[in-house]
Amino acid sequence: MTTSELSSCLYNMNTESSPRLLSLDIFRGATVALMILVNNAGDSKHKYPQLNHSKWHGFTLTDLVFPCFLFMVGVSVVFALDKKKAILTDHKKIIADAFRRMTLLILISWAILLFLKHDIPADIESYQAKISYLAAHLRIPGVLQRIAVVFFIVSLLYLKTDQRFRSYLLIIILLGYYIILCFIPAPGLTYPSLEPETNWGAWLDQLILGTGHLYKVTWDPEGLLSTLPSIATCLLGVQAGSWLKRKDIDTGAKVSWMFVYGITAIVLGLFWDIFFPINKKLWTSSFVLYTGGMAIAALALIYWLVDIQGRKRFTWPFVVFGRNALAAYILSDIIRAVFNMVPVGGMGGMEFIQTRLISTLFSSPYNASLAGSLLFVLLCWLPMYWLYLKKIIIKV
């Protein structure tokens, strides 16, 4: 088997001999649609509360999006690598391809930040000075970067370990992260802290990455230490994918076990919240269980409705996004950046559309903002629909 053949199989379940599970595309598509919606407000000053991340401790619908995406990465790893893991005793080619994907995703993210999202002060004129400024202010961590790193690490774990090891590792990560953040003071402190600038994650990011390369200067919601519990989120997806792939139990038993596992995780997450608050920016252990349980239960419900009961009406818009989920997310960043580069009426293109067109149609600024977000989702959906019609799946 050649490297190109292996590459064509990763994240592409069309190559599986078993029937394609439409529920996976629907879940992934709904997740990326919601991710684009909450990331691209028509008017950022007038967003409904559930379309904003929680300020610190707490939970909103928006906080569910990223863990669901990482959860589906874990599910996809199982479907992409299951046969390859069994057929090939030497996994070097698969690992090399996974490493290439990780590197390419990170480079794409940095390219978007450098060339499309960074504003350079007007007093910096020379080309060399601009390059130096961008290099000094490039945000190193980020959403795509975390997806890439977690995908690679979980791929290695799936190839080289069994489910029992991964289950123990999941528990160790959650408990270890809890102990580090809640019982061990970060250097310079006399008490453990969960505050934004004084927890272990912030200290580690400042030490290794420096303040010029973080989203919030002194801390980053996708920082180094919180990548550990995000791996745990992805491992929950691996567990769910492994259940769905099993042929020794019937579909009803799969759904039942997924519901039980999901609800149990939700309850444990809510109980742990008493001691270790649910917090997306810290990616706390309670957050992993709470959101992971929701993802498992939601996937079980969609699997039962669509793949078992055959209720597929009105699902195809999500399938369109689901077939090219990562491409849709990357495209959303590019579309917004390009529109805002084009000045119209003394403002960026997206702002002009929102303030001069959409806002005039609504009496409520919150409804106008939501309408602008939905329009942007549609704008991203249309090229994905063309790819869907052409049966093109873009793989990074």
Image (spheres, rainbow, N blue to C red):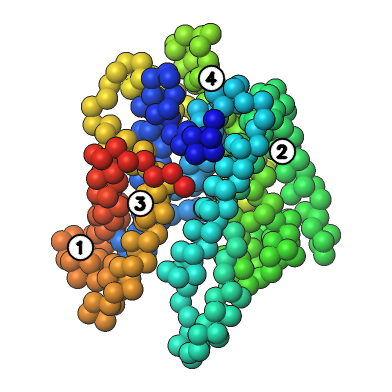
Distance between the alpha carbons at the discs numbered 2 and 4: 22 Å
- Tell me which label, 1 or 2, sits earlier in the chain: 2
Residue type of the residue flagged with mark 3: Leu
Q: Which residue is mark 2?
A: 173
Q: How many marks?
A: 4
Q: Say if mark 3 contacts mark 1, CB within 8 Å.
A: no
Q: Is residue 359 above or below residue 250?
A: below
Q: Relative to the observer, which residue lies in front, 41 or 395?
A: 395
The reply to whether the C-beta atoms of the residues labelled 3 and 4 are less than 8 Å apart is: no
Residue at screen point 53% across, 41% down: 70
Residue 169 at x, y = what percent?
Answer: 72, 32
Q: According to the image, label 1 marks what residue?
A: 358
Residue visible at 55% across and 56% down? 106
Whether pointer 2 and pointer 4 mark residues with C-beta atoms closer than 8 Å, the reply is no
Q: Which residue is mark 3?
A: 37
Report helix, strand or loop for mark 1.
Answer: helix
How far, Cα to Cα, is label 4 from label 1?
A: 45 Å
Q: Nearer the viewer, mark 2 or mark 4?
A: 4
- Residue located beneath label 4 in the image: 243
Residue nearer the viewer, 114 or 295: 114
Q: Amino acid at mark 2?
A: Ile
Identify residue type, mark 1.
Answer: Ile
Question: Which residue is situated farthest in the front direction here?
Answer: 2
